[in-house]
Image: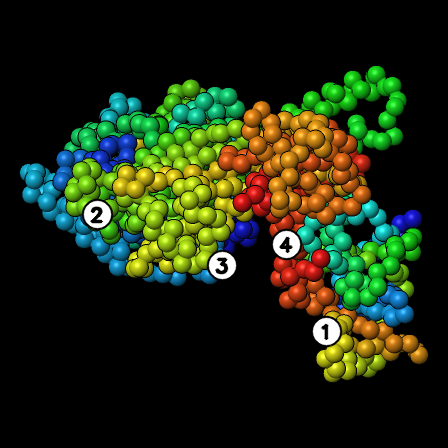
Amino acid sequence: MSNDGISKEPMLEMYLFEGNLLVEQLEEIIIKCEKDKKFEMGDINEIFRIMHTIKGSSAMMMFNQIGLLAHSLEDLFFFIRANQNIEIDFVGLSDLVLSGIDFIKAEMNKIEKGSGADALADELIGEIKTMLEQMKISYEGQNAAPATLANSTPDGQKALYYISSYQNPSAEKATKYCVQAFFEDDCQMENIRAYMLVNNLQEIVIEIHHIPADIIDNAASADIIRETGFTICFSTLAPYGEIESILNQVAFVRKMEINQVDDYPAEFKVLQSRREIILDEIPQEYQQTLTETVETGSTNNRQQNIISVSVAKLDMLMDIVGEIVISEAMVTKNPDLVGLQLEGFSKAARQLRKLTDELQDIVMSIRMVPVSMVFHKMNRIVRDMSKRLAKEVNLEIIGETTEVDKNIIDHLSDPLMHLIRNAMDHGLESKEDRITAGKPSQGKITLEAKNAGGDVLIIVRDDGRGLNRDKILNKARQRGLVHKPESELTDKEVFAYIMLAGFSTNEQVTEFSGRGVGMDVVAKNIEKIGGSITIESNFGKGTEIFVKIPLTLAIIDGIEVGVGKSRYTIPTISIRESFRSDDQEIISDGDGNDMIMIRGQCYPVLRLHRMFKIKNAVTTISDGMMVMIETDSKAACLFVDRLVGEQQVVVKALPKYLKKVQGIAGCTILGDGGISLILDANGILEGQLA
Amino acid sequence: MAVLTEFDETVEDTQKGKFLTFTIGKETYGFEIKYVTEIIGIQEITEVPELPIYVKGIINLRGKIIPVMDVRLRFKKEPREYNDRTCIVVIDIHDISIGLIVDHVAEVVVIPPENIVPPPAIKTGFHNRYIKGIGKVGNEVKLLLDCNKLLNDEEINTLSNAVE
Amino acid sequence: MVKSVLVVDDALFMRLGLKTMLEKNGFQVIGEAANGVVAVEKYKELHPDLVTMDITMPEVDGVEALRQIRAFDGNAKVVMVSAMGQEVMIRSAIMAGAKNFIVKPFTEESVMKVLSKL
């Protein structure tokens, strides 16, 4: 295929896309089978099919090493499929397949990056072949006769002669022909092609014989045909023209001679005297596997109703829909229309608004992807690490169907991996320690996802040794990171110290973690996608890490407020209420911080014009508005000049050139072309409050 | 009154040696036209908190949000009120788009390499850092700027040092 | 007259590859299926002139799907797509009425050779 001038690019992309998908599926199945200590028929079939597909595609793309590796695994599972009773070394087999998977993943990675797939799979293939040999030997030991399958070629058998026809009284009036055919070099499976010639002639012949005769079962006949050609002798009432056209239906025939004969050549006379009918027979075992339906677990079925779309196109679609939302606002909220009574227009505008809302919802949902893919990747990590650390661990996954924007999911994988690694390396104790502590020897890690308002909450929970508050506090104190009186620090705040750069309380650096460069990177990555991390822990019992990430970054509901001549948008989800107040109600402490009492609770008052140094803003409380914003743990009242209105806005990122400003999440373009900065409640509250 | 001019930057070779010049006070500066994507009149700038004093904020350029820098303030000169001659020159370097606010745009000149001399090696002058060379056009002297330095100075990378 | 084709293969990659080849050579791919069940459904719905049928597929494999399609339409023209080592299945397929077969990895040339005869 590669020399055909068909552009390689889309094929390469598809190869990598599908390859990666299949390899992930395969990994999941193998890990599951290893855990359950059995291979269901459905699993074997799927593994076989996956290797078969990878073999085929890799051959097409000329990635021969991957193809050969896949082929050897295919053979291995072919054998397992046909001989279900054999003893399988689950751990050994899984390791082998996982090594194969790693090889393929690594090669595909290289291909993706532009360097070639240049690693050799010889060693691995050797190991796989060895395992297959061992299986065959032990199988033969278990059973009397090994199952013969059409995949293997019986060696050195002399070709037997069968006759494939019946005698007919009108045979005497028919014309006899002899056909000799040669097939094109490299056309493969000449014996089957020869069979096709015979099969096609069946309808018009009275009797037919051919040499070699055992073309069906004996793959070696292909070689014979390649060398000496295929000879058919038959008698028929059909005219020559019909014979010729029927024979020409078969492709890859290089040379064919059709001769009318008075009598068959000597070799064929032998055939005439023996009449046995060919049984249309497929070996019993094979028959079973042919028609067996596959059980669930195959995500292939789901793909029937799913098409794959390039993310670039989705992004473009999102952008345009975003622009449409802005344009729609620019039309319906146009300053030119202020004060005009336009009933017909308003009605049409409402309808337009309704439709753009729907369009937006649908496009947003297209981008939503379940977290399952990312979650399932963790299975492999848990498996590998539990081996290396000699810790038994059970990974429980809850809520994997929870959906998150595609943009965000890509950034989740690394942080989650690190959290799981940490839990395994540091969180969970060794088997002995666990038993001493009265815990089950098998550690448990739970990975859970659930919706929480406009965010998605991902929880990594372990039942390990938990965090030592005092140890952490000491370290923080040593490094001068403690800025609050220690008695006032909540557990959450103490635990949060471990997310600061360079903070590891580990004396030893292990292969997986402990360098102290992990948690802060995790925190930063989560922050980058607009999320936050909180840590809770029970010393001796376990640790829970809560990762909160926004459902989507793209479109939010917000309240527009004005301060001076600047405009800001506050996400509706962060607003608890808004109200008017006056200077009487404001309490000042000695340091210049303002507070206000609402229903018995005290809230800080943050004057936006002071925070952002905005000129010409309202400073008298009674002339402005209070907007109470809140996050999980904190709340405050923002003082602004005025409330402008509620609207749905398309979030645009601030130009990268500008450094990130704490408290500003992005910006949006308003109906009149102006820009409104979007406030980030978390950022504001974290930044302004201790 | 917006003066909207767009420059075709597809064929780089034909743009070699072409400079767009603008004035700040008495001096005339210039930089290579290949970086200029358009020139627009001054428009409403949305302020963004906590930026360096010379980054005035952001503007909406047909749906794209770009930051704008006041070159006067960048060169630590006296700030001036914007009027209708004030222009924003939008440049694009390494995928960063930024608008430069200048007093007014002069012209596009071709300055052959022979007429460009390296700047004097005096370390004292502040904006020496940004000057790539001195171009002579007739009797006049144009200070040719290094766009990269203008944007990517260490000062910019550590914006936390912003002087408010 | 443009011939319409139904491409059946459980691998996205193969479907894309075949589709590209076919369309480049003047065929029109009017449908795709990733398993035997859908293949038969689509055949009944779309009535393509030709079908390319992969042998190894989940749910119902290519040979069985071929049988069902031929039972529905005795004139159905189906070409099997197989890998080396599947002689038995190809033979069954031919006996069940497949017109020809292509072996993976295939070239555009050989695909066209086979299809032009149908």
The answer as to whether the residues below labels 2 and 3 share one chain is yes
Compare residues A81 and A102 and report the one nearer the observer: A102
How many discs appear?
A: 4
Q: Secondary structure at mark 3?
A: loop
- Reading the image, the residue beneath label 3 is A114
Q: Residue shown at 83%/17% (left/top)?
A: A344
Marks 2 & 1 on one chain: no
Cα distance between the residues tagged 3 and 1 = 39 Å
Q: Is residue B106 left or right of residue A170?
A: right
Q: Quadrant of residue A265?
A: top left
Residue position marked by numbered label 1 in the rendering: B129
Instruction: Calculate the distance from the C-alpha at mark 2 to the C-alpha at mark 1.
Output: 60 Å
Residue A138 position by quadrant:
top left
Which of C108 and A449 lies nearest the eye of the viewer? A449
Q: Are marks 3 and 1 on the same chain?
A: no
Q: Residue at x 91, y 76 (%)?
A: B140
Q: Earlier in the sequence, mark 4 or mark 2?
A: 2
Identify the residue under disc 2.
A430
Disc 4 to disc 2, C-alpha distance: 45 Å
x%, y% of residue B21? Answer: 85, 66
Q: Residues within 10 Å of mark 4 (few under 14, many from 20)?
A: some
Instruction: Judge whether A609 appears above or below B70 on screen.
Output: above
Q: Chain of mark 3?
A: A
Badge nearest the viewer, 4 or 3: 4
Residue drawn at the location 22% of the way across and 35% of the way down: A36
**Amino acid type, label 2:** Ser
**Whether label 4 touches label 3, CB < 8 Å:** no
